[in-house]
Amino acid sequence: MTDQPEDTAESTVTPAQTIAVHAEALDSEVDDDATAGESTGRWRRMLVYGVLPTLALLMALGAGYLKWQSGVAHESVLARTQSVQTATESAIAMLSYTPDTAERDLGAARDRLTGPFRDSYSSLVHDVVIPGALQKGVSAVATVPAAASVSTTENRAVVIVFVDQTTTIGNQPPTDTASSVKVTLDKVDSRWLISDFTPV
């Protein structure tokens, strides 16, 4: 009994079939690449039209906020410096006079004040201080060795002022006094004016 060669027609792959299989695989890869390309394109569009403008906006807002903060800090420092300087100069003006210049000097000091305190200071100066300076020859010299800001807002400030005052009555020896005063200032028409002057 001779062996018959097996029928291999079913297992034989023809060149046409091989080409078809490769073509199908290639089409599949192209489709995958096309899908990946579309996905990449979507991400690029999202990045260009969505993320980058948002980042640019956030950076602009951040820069604007920092500039605003810097401006606020600068204004706060400026207000504190101006209010302390005004409190110092005004305290000296209010508490310094001679018999010959009391009316002029203390009248000028009145222009540094505001509100009800201005009226009460004016009454005290005209009713008591100026007549006493003229009748008894009273003179006073005030200096401010130190002053410190307690609080400052856009339109109001509180300053502690340390005052040394030398007072001379006629021919008597001068007397020295040291005191501290809480000075409240209000900003009126861009000027810091004293609205309260309370010894502490």
Image: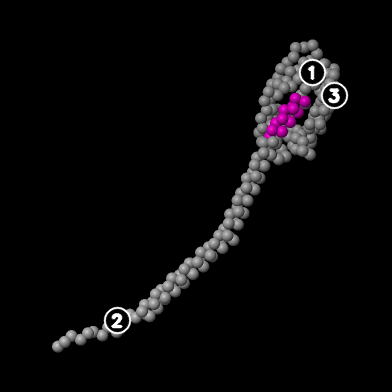
Which residue is at 70% across, 31% downward?
84
| Farthest left residue in view | 1
Determine the image quadrant of residue 166. top right
Q: Earlier in the sequence, mark 1 or mark 3?
A: 3
Q: Is residue 91 magenta?
A: yes
Classified by dominant secondary structure, the portion drawn in magenta counts as helix
Q: Which residues are magenta?
A: 80-93
Kind of element beneath mark 2: loop
Where is 2 relative to 200, above or below? below
Quarter the C terminus occupies: top right
Identify the amino acid type marked 3.
Glu
C-alpha span from label 1 to label 3: 12 Å
User: Position of 122 compared to 165: left or right?
Assistant: right
Q: Tell me residue 97's x, y (percent).
A: 80, 21
Residue 141 picture location, percent across and down: 76, 20
| 132, 53: nearer the viewer | 53
The answer to which image quadrant residue 72 occupies is top right
> Foreground residue, 158 or 71?
71
Numbered label tally: 3
Task: Assess whether mark 2 and mark 3 are in contact (beta carbons under 8 angstroms).
Answer: no
Q: Residue at x 70, y 36 (%)?
A: 79
Q: Which residue is mark 2?
A: 11
The quadrant in which the N terminus is found is bottom left
Residue at the disc numbered 1: 139
Three-letter amino acid code of the residue under disc 2: Ser
